[in-house]
Amino acid sequence: MKTDTIAAIATAMTNAGIGIIRISGEEAIIVADRVFCAKNGKTLKESKSHTIHYGFIMDGSEIIDEVLVMLMKSPNSYTREDTVEIDCHGGTLVMQRILDIVIRCGARPAEPGEFTKRAFLNGRIDLSQAESVIDVINAKNDFALRSSLHQLQGSVSNKIKELRKKIIHETAFIESAIDDPEHYSLDDYSTHLSDLILELKTEIKRLLDSADNGKILKEGIHTVIVGKPNVGKSSILNVLVGSERAIVTDVAGTTRDVLEEHVNLNGISLNIIDTAGIRQTDDIVEKIGVNKAKEYLDRADLILYVIDRSRDLTEEDNEIEQMIKDKNVIVLMNKSDLQQKIKEDDLKMISEHIISISAKEGNGIDDLTAMIQQMFLHGQVALNDEVIITNVRHKNALAQTFESLNMVEESIRNQMPEDFYSIDLLNAYESLGYVIGEKIEDDLADEIFSKFCMGK
């Protein structure tokens, strides 16, 4: 682990009211004292931890900015190292100037995520908590934010540690009984272990089942709006977004490229793509847009198939229906405020999820939200004390754990010697350890923390 002193701008590089430069490491206080002149003349080194000091950042005899400096001494800081944060005015020039001076005075530029990486390596947080930090920053809805905060507070860590404690207890008992059969008996032990394995598998299965919800909470539902030209796709996008994002005209084929928008519907994130109307066309640009629409359909989690219920279905609709069969489809019967030529029964072969909607009147959005919740989240997700897996790496580790427990069950059924049990139990124990980072390769740690923003 690198123990040199690092520094970075911890706020966004844009003009704002306040900017923060963060310094952490063995010489953080020494470096800060080289650039900071307190109004009362007192140095940071002789000051108490968790105090704030008013003064100036100096470049030699030149005053660079008027600042407040927060002092946090080891181990009571984010990184468990001596840490100094300089609160300055939030201009990009002044922040960069202060950072340059700090680096000249003994610090080096921090790598992306290096402050959080040090918090992990120094044992203040485990790996699952470290990963939740970036999830909090990137949260797109209330559910994602609350889930990430739960994980940051240790919801996943505590559950994993609880499971590992049960597994290692049984492993230790088996090893003790094998080494000292006079004091530890394995008579009828397989019955006890079978019950425990069933209990562990039930808990891990619940965590694995939560991963689908977790993916949706974290990343959003990749949603494609599709339909033939001039059925109101762009109007529906505008209603969902809440602004005139797409051009709407009576001319068929207005949308030629794809439009991407992020929408929050009552806590559910939709990554929406509005596509060109699918039809046979000789227009080269429109044809490219139609081909793109077909490509996005293959990758969609959800398809919103828009039809104009005031017009009869055509061969173009039949072509679209072939493309979207066997996918998650909600049929939006648009223009429900006009005379209706299409009935719901005409669309049952496409999907059982059908909603009447009027983009012009804004009707049907609440029904759409409820239907998406029912399809993807099985109703509202109540986080409370529930542990939800939102990380693919965690899901894979849990799946490996589940498989190792299956191997233990198989050994019990085949009446194998007890030392076979301990081999697979230890594999399960190690797989769970990957979630919290107890066993992790350096390159994986580097990959995880490289995804963080600078200064975090």
Image (spheres, grey):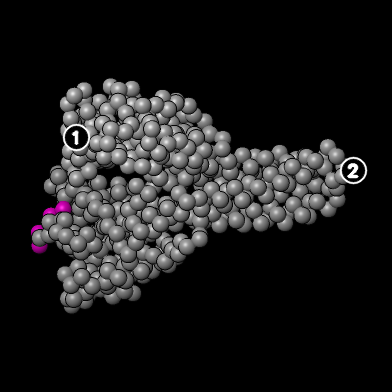
- Identify which residue, 283 or 139, lies in the foreground: 139
Badge 1: few (under 14), some or many (20 or more) residues near its Cα, within 10 Å? some
Residue behind mark 2 = 182
Front one among 233 and 12: 12
| Residue 17 visible from this viewpoint | yes
Horizontal and vertical percent for residue 183?
87, 44
* Whole-percent x, y for residue 335 in the image: 19, 71
Q: Which residue is pictured at 48% across the width and 26% down the height? A: 1
The residue mark sitting in front, 2 or 1, is 1
In the rendered image, the vertical position of residue 342 relative to residue 47, given as above or below: below
Q: Kindly identify the amino acid type of the residue bearing the numbered disc 2.
A: Glu
Q: Position of residue 109 (x, y in %)?
A: 32, 27
**Of helix, strand and loop, which one carries label 2?**
loop
Image: magenta residue range: 250-255
The image quadrant where one finds the C terminus is top left
**Label 2 to label 1: alpha-carbon separation:** 75 Å
The residue carrying mark 1 is 65
Q: Residue furthest bottom?
A: 339
Q: Do callouts 2 and 1 mark residues in contact (Cβ within 8 Å)?
A: no
